[in-house]
Amino acid sequence: MNIAKNMEAIFVTAAVLLGVSAYASAAAEATVALQPAIHVAAAHAPMQVVVIKAKRLTAVKKASLS
């Protein structure tokens, strides 16, 4: 099959698939936007906290790492 002869069909097919996927993702975002209860529930969730328990490096140890 000669790809050069079918390049226009390949381009049109790719453009149609890109348009359909953009339309579908926009529709999915609009569906999520219509459900504000999900966002409100997430706002009341407790904040996650990360605690790092470690000693600081001394200047000598920092210099030895580099």
Image (cartoon, rainbow, N blue to C red):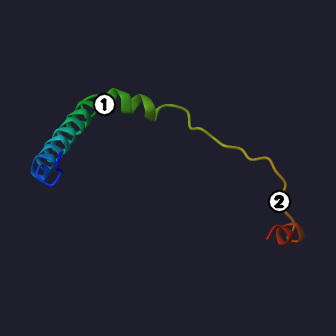
Circle 1: residue type: Pro
Q: Which mark is residue 56?
A: 2
Circle 1 residue: 36
For label 1, the SS is helix
Instruction: Tell me which corner region of the image, top left, top right, bottom left or bottom right, holds residue 33.
Output: top left
Instruction: Tell me which corner region of the image, top left, top right, bottom left or bottom right, holds residue 18.
Output: top left
Q: Earlier in the sequence, mark 2 or mark 1?
A: 1
Instruction: Tell me which corner region of the image, top left, top right, bottom left or bottom right, holds residue 32.
Output: top left
Circle 2: residue type: Arg
For label 2, the SS is loop
Q: Residues within 10 Å of mark 1 (few under 14, many from 20)?
A: few
The x, y position of residue 48, in whole percent, is 59, 38
Q: Residues within 10 Å of mark 2 (few under 14, many from 20)?
A: few
At x 44%, y 35%, the residue is 43
At x 16%, y 49%, the residue is 2
The x, y position of residue 20, in whole percent, is 16, 38
Considering the image in quadrants, where does the C terminus appear? bottom right
The x, y position of residue 4, in whole percent, is 15, 55
- Towards the viewer: 11 or 65: 11
